[in-house]
Image (spheres, helix red, strand yellow):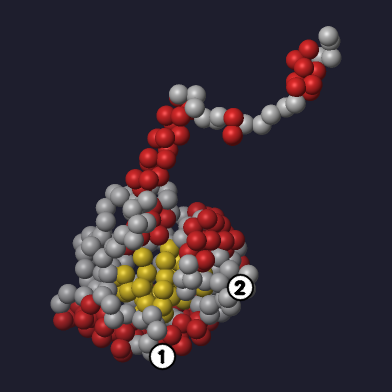
């Protein structure tokens, strides 16, 4: 089987130039990465959303650097074609610029990622410049930024007023100038995201930002119906796997309790002579 060439930043830029949409999904483990990669998705984000979808936390701020790197390593073992992005967790880049660069480097050196993503606009521009100067590609994230959702008043659409939309555009241009190779726009009115996408020379990746971004991203568990604590308006479920998985688990329990599993087809045999030798120790 021929392996497709690994996706690069140049490929993403070419897709934007040619008007071809970029595809992106999250993945958090080896089997998930295998599937996403085999599906031909361009970008895999090891998102801090794993705090909620995999680790059961109520928000994204609880996940640690060690936990993120653990999952990055697993994803990198499964993906061969997709461009891999590690999500820098809360407080891994906000305090000291040198610490931010060092933590970003861990994602490439230990986590085997190709790039990192971090949240924020003008307030993180100098940090982004420092990370990029160290040779680490950076994806920005504007609009609804989950790590600071409390400051934004909760998980709400951003850029709904003219002033807020103008600030978002300015932030996007600042991130581009700082060296970001792409910017995620989350929970932004479609018309605002369209204008931002037109003004930027780097790709925009939308999530709840309408159809006019240069690419789209969804969370793996949302797309497959595996996370049911809440479903954002912008999520489309392409499958509802929770119910068939639950039914399979219940069927297993019922068959074990009824001694129907394992049956002969799922058991191993020993020939009669060896069985007798085992049972009676060679004694007639």
Provide the residue designation for mark 1: 17
Residue where numbered disc 2 is placed: 3
Image x and y of residue 56, in percent:
38, 47
Q: Is mark 2 on a helix, strand or loop?
A: loop
Query: In screen coordinates, is 21 left or right of 159?
Result: right
Point out which mark residue 284 bears. none
> How busy is the neighbourhood of tag 1: few (under 14 within 10 Å), some, or many (20 plus)?
few
82, 85: nearer the viewer = 82
Q: Residue at x 35, y 57 (%)?
A: 239
Cα–Cα gap, marks 1 and 2: 25 Å
For image coordinates 80% across by 18% down, the residue present is: 277
Would you identify the image quadrant in which residue 223 lies? bottom left
Residue under the image location 50 percent in, 77 percent down: 137
Q: Give the residue displayed 62% in from the left and 73% down from the top.
A: 2
Element at badge 1? helix
Compared to residue 3, the image places residue 61 above or below, namely above
Query: Residue 46, how many percent across, how many down?
Result: 47, 63
54 versus 10 height, above or below: above
Q: Provide residue 205's location: percent of width, then percent of height.
A: 36, 76
Q: For residue 212, which quarter of the picture? A: bottom left
Query: Between disc 1 and disc 2, whose residue precedes?
Result: 2
Give whichever of 90, 226 is nearer the camera.
226
């Amino acid at each position: 089987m021929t392996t497709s060439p690994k996706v690069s930043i140049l490929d993403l830029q070419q897709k934007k130039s040619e008007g071809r949409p970029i595809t992106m999904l999250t993945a958090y483990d080896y089997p998930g990465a295998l599937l996403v990669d085999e599906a031909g998705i361009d970008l895999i984000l090891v998102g801090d959303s794993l705090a909620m979808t995999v680790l059961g936390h109520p928000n994204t701020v609880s996940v640690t650097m060690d936990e993120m790197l653990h999952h990055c390593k697993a994803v990198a073992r499964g993906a061969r074609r997709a461009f891999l992005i590690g999500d820098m967790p809360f407080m891994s880049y906000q305090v000291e610029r040198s610490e931010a660069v060092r933590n970003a480097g861990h994602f490439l050196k230990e986590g085997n990622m190709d790039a990192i993503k971090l949240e924020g606009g003008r307030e993180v521009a100098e940090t982004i410049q420092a990370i990029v100067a160290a040779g680490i590609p950076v994806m920005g994230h504007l609009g609804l930024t989950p790590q600071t959702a409390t400051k934004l008043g909760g998980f709400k659409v951003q850029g709904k007023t003219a002033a807020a939309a103008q600030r978002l555009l300015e932030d996007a241009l600042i991130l581009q100038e700082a060296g970001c190779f792409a910017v995620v726009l989350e929970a932004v009115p479609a018309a605002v995201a369209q204008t931002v996408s037109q003004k930027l020379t780097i790709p925009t990746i939308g999530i709840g930002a309408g159809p006019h971004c240069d690419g789209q991203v969804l969370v793996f568990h949302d797309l497959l119906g595996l996370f049911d604590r809440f479903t954002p308006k912008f999520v489309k479920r392409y499958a509802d796997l929770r119910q068939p998985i639950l039914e399979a688990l219940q069927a297993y329990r019922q068959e074990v309790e009824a001694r129907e599993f394992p049956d002969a087809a799922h058991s191993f045999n020993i020939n009669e002579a060896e069985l007798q030798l085992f049972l009676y120790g060679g004694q007639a």
